[in-house]
Image (cartoon, helix red, strand yellow):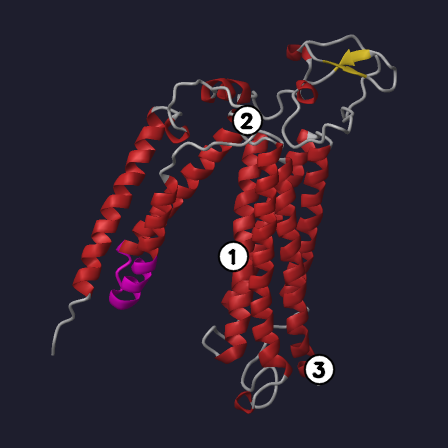
Amino acid sequence: MTHQAHTYHMVDPSPWPLTGAAAAFLLTWGIAIWFHYSSMTLVSLGLILLLLTMIQWWRDIIRESTYQGQHTPPVQKGLRYGMVLFISSEVLFFIGFFWAFYHSSLSPTPELGGVWPPTGITPLNPFEVPLLNTAVLLASGVTVTWTHHSIMAGERKQAIQSLSLTIILGLYFTTLQAMEYYEAPFTIADGVYGSTFFVATGFHGLHVIIGSTFLAVCLLRTGSNSTLQHNTILALKQQLDTDILLMLFDYSCMSPSIDEDLK
Amino acid sequence: MYYKLSGFTQKLTGSAPTTAYNPQGLRAGLPAESPTMIFASPTKVISEAGATVEYMGKNKVPDLQRRFQVPDGVPIHLKGGVPDRLLYRTTMALTVGGVLYCLVALFIASQPRKN
């Protein structure tokens, strides 16, 4: 490292924004070509390029932070603001889905038969797997908090154990959700009920999968002594808490359907 | 050898390297007590400090820090050596080749057969 008189991180020129943009380009047109000609070549190419970009970009960030010490307190502050903004945008993103759901369900149109769930839809019973999944997600919130406190106390062994537990719970949630999708008696094409259900729970499931992957990377890094990732875990905890909140919302969203069933 | 001041006995006692190696993000203001209290026992060297130190393998971070802090002017994405160069070239080749292939595919798609 050369001498520098400030605490900011002057990044090296990087190829990853370019390759990432190319990946997005290939994915966009790849999907269009796939829909038109049933050829998956371009979309697969885009996915591979996206994966390569993500792996190498984040590898470089680990090098810059843990190995070069570029993430000084002012840099960390910027990163934290970024995470706050990202999570806020995520919350608003999901508010849109809830808005769509309540718009359609609170005053069902005559086209739906004037009832919610719409005529002809058999909803899932929210006291079965959805309730279990809520419990699993809440439990994962407990274990990730345990991880966070282990890290603050410097308890490496406990951090690794509780983080592993969190990842297992995340995978369990995803498995249950996949089963639920497989068994669901309606599809995304079954009117506004199917659309709002699968779009909202689908994006929620995607976030759980991304979160599990992220936590798995944290686990590998904690395991390899890379650092005790106080900041990362904190950020992930926030995201997980958001997810729990969303799951509760999902649950409350489906409750009106039980009332209908009971009647 | 690593030492810490035991708040209980007010004496220097042996401690795990994890306590001495203070990772980023821990609040410096809070004196973190080591989890297991050592009651003024004789100090230990790392090799005899036991399972907690080497839990899940050797700590390679100091070596990696030395390796990635060499001021050789190589950008961070190539600083790892040959594997880095291979990965970078594969990614760049896919970027250029993929974009060209995509443009050709779009050109063909823009000329539908006329009935």
Sequence order check, earlier mark of 1 and 2: 2
Residue type at mark 2?
Answer: Gly
The answer to whether one can see residue A180 in this image is no
Residue type at mark 1?
Answer: Leu
* Discs 2, 3 touching: Cβ within 8 Å: no
Q: Secondary structure at mark 1?
A: helix
- The CA span between labels 1 and 2 is 32 Å
Do pointers 1 and 2 mark residues of a single chain? yes
In the image, A197 versus A176, the foreground residue is A197
Residue A232 falls within the magenta-colored stretch: no
Going by the image, does A220 lie left or right of B86? right
In the image, B60 versus A133, the foreground residue is B60
Going by the image, does A10 lie left or right of A101? left
**What is the quadrant of residue A122 in the picture?**
bottom right
The residue under label 3 is A262
**Mostly what secondary structure, the magenta segment?**
helix
Going by the image, does A25 lie left or right of A144? left
Q: Secondary structure at mark 3?
A: helix
- The CA span between labels 2 and 3 is 60 Å
The residue under label 2 is A69
Q: Which residues are magenta?
A: A28-41
The chain letter under disc 1 is A
Sequence order check, earlier mark of 3 and 1: 1
In the image, A144 versus A181, the foreground residue is A144
Quadrant where the C terminus of chain A is found in the figure: bottom right
The residue under label 1 is A206
Residue type at mark 3?
Answer: Leu
Farthest residue toward the right? B9
